[in-house]
């Protein structure tokens, strides 16, 4: 019997200073259409790393989708640095430096199949003086 795939969807509601309601709806609808259970986690700026670690332990998702900017991606990377997990990045920050470097499309519709289903690539996380500088 095949278990339904489960993803965690991390959303930074203030990244890029844009309302994320439509994005969240689009991601949740796409998940439903493709038979993937989505657990949505909105960051608050307080204890996000710890909360995400706990959520990951509880659900053991196949993938973690991240809608935010570079800071949100960095936070998720730090929280889950010791886990074997694939990140699906949905650009939603003000500059989206990593998304630009990865040549991700700008629209949600174009990004969803990539974030949900594309093959993984390994990327490095840089640590300076025992602090994560970037991913």
Image (tube, rainbow, N blue to C red):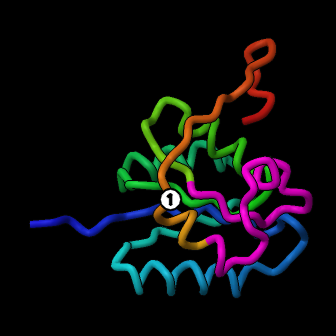
Q: Quadrant of the N terminus?
A: bottom left
Q: Quadrant of the C terminus?
A: top right
Left/right placement of residue 91 relative to residue 64 reads right
Q: Eyeballing the image, is 123 above or below 7?
A: above
Residue 133: quadrant of the picture: top right
Q: Is residue 15 magenta?
A: no
At label 1, counting other C-alpha atoms closer than 10 Å, the crowd grade (few under 14, some 14-19, many 20 or more) is few
Question: Residue extending furthest left?
Answer: 1
Image point 63% across, 40% down: which residue? 77
Image point 46% across, 68% down: which residue? 39
Left/right placement of residue 79 relative to residue 70 reads left
Q: Is residue 97 magenta?
A: yes
Q: Which residues are magenta?
A: 88-111
| SS at badge 1 | loop
Image point 74% across, 68% down: which residue? 105
Left/right placement of residue 4 relative to residue 93 reads left
Q: Nearer the viewer, residue 107 or 5?
A: 107
Q: Nearer the viewer, residue 57 or 37?
A: 37
Image point 79% across, 47% down: which residue? 101
Q: Eyeballing the image, is 17 above or below 24?
A: above
Q: Position of residue 82 (x, y in %)?
A: 49, 29
Q: Position of residue 102 (x, y in %)?
A: 73, 50
Say how many tags the image has. 1
Residue 113: quadrant of the picture: bottom right
Q: Position of residue 3 (x, y in %)?
A: 20, 65
Q: Position of residue 125 (x, y in %)?
A: 68, 29
Residue 130: quadrant of the picture: top right
Residue linked to disc 1: 118
């Amino acid at each position: 019997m095949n278990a339904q795939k489960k993803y965690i969807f991390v959303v930074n509601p203030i990244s890029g200073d844009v309302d994320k309601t439509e994005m969240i709806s689009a991601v949740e609808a796409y998940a439903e259409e493709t038979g993937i259970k989505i657990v949505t986690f909105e960051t608050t700026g307080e204890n996000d790393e710890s909360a995400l670690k706990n959520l990951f332990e509880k659900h053991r998702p196949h993938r973690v989708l991240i809608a935010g900017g570079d800071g949100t991606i960095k936070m998720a990377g730090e929280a889950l640095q010791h886990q074997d997990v694939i990140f699906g990045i949905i650009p939603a920050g003000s500059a989206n430096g990593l998304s630009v470097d990865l040549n991700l499309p700008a629209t949600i519709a174009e990004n969803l199949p990539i974030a949900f289903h594309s093959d993984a690539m390994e990327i490095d996380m840089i640590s300076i003086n025992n602090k994560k500088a970037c991913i």
